[in-house]
Amino acid sequence: GTLAATLIFLGAFTYGVVYTLWLKKRTVWNVVIGGAAGSFALLAGAVATAPSQGLAIGPVPMLLAAMLFLWTPPHFWALAIIRAKDYARAGVPMLPVVAGDDETRRQILLYSIQMLVLTLIPAVVGMFGLPYLLMAGILGAIFLYYAIRMQKNHSTNATWGLYKYSLLYLALLFV
């Protein structure tokens, strides 16, 4: 319907114009805006599969979109630490290029903590049950472990560990 099409347009516009053309080469916060673009796609899919809601977006898709939004910076900033020289050569002001690896690791940890707290909220307010709470808690604790490990161990292996786990994390959390 109209809402799904609007959300798809907003996601494409946010990604193609706001993120890629306007912000990607201008600010270290480009990845955060990229996370918003990805969230629109999730919302559009939710609306398209539940057209009976009309112009409303339910609380579950909103929470999932917020989780995706908070997941994006730790995921991409880990990769940006690994590929910082490539981003610098390309003139893309990723956080590690502009603020350094230590600040990027700090931001990754802060976003990881926020993400963990947000993922537990649905179970705490009774939207999802105990199995979800256990999985979200375990998966989030492992994510936090990798983020803390990056704080202490500045090796490429530690950073790759978070990046690779972040892929598995999101898939398992959304299942």
Image (cartoon, grey):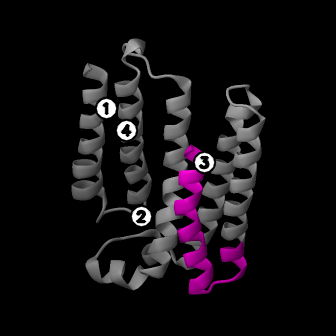
Residue annotated with mark 1: 7
Residue annotated with mark 3: 173
- The kind of secondary structure element at disc 2 is loop
Q: Amino acid at mark 1?
A: Leu
Is 79 located above or below residue 16 in the figure?
A: below
User: Could you tell me which quadrant the C terminus lies in?
Assistant: top right
**Among the 4 quarters of the image, the one containing residue 84:** bottom left
Q: Amino acid at mark 2?
A: Val
Tell whether label 1 touches label 4 (CB within 8 Å).
Answer: yes
- The kind of secondary structure element at disc 3 is helix
Task: Locate residue 92, reporting x and y percent.
Answer: 32, 72
Q: Amino acid at mark 4?
A: Phe
Question: What whole-number distance in Å separates the C-alpha atoms at marks 4 and 1?
Answer: 6 Å
Is 77 located above or below residue 59 in the figure?
A: below
Task: Locate residue 111, reporting x and y percent.
Answer: 61, 55
Question: What whole-number distance in Å separates the C-alpha atoms at marks 3 and 2?
Answer: 27 Å
Residue annotated with mark 4: 40
Question: What whole-number distance in Å separates the C-alpha atoms at marks 2 and 4?
Answer: 21 Å
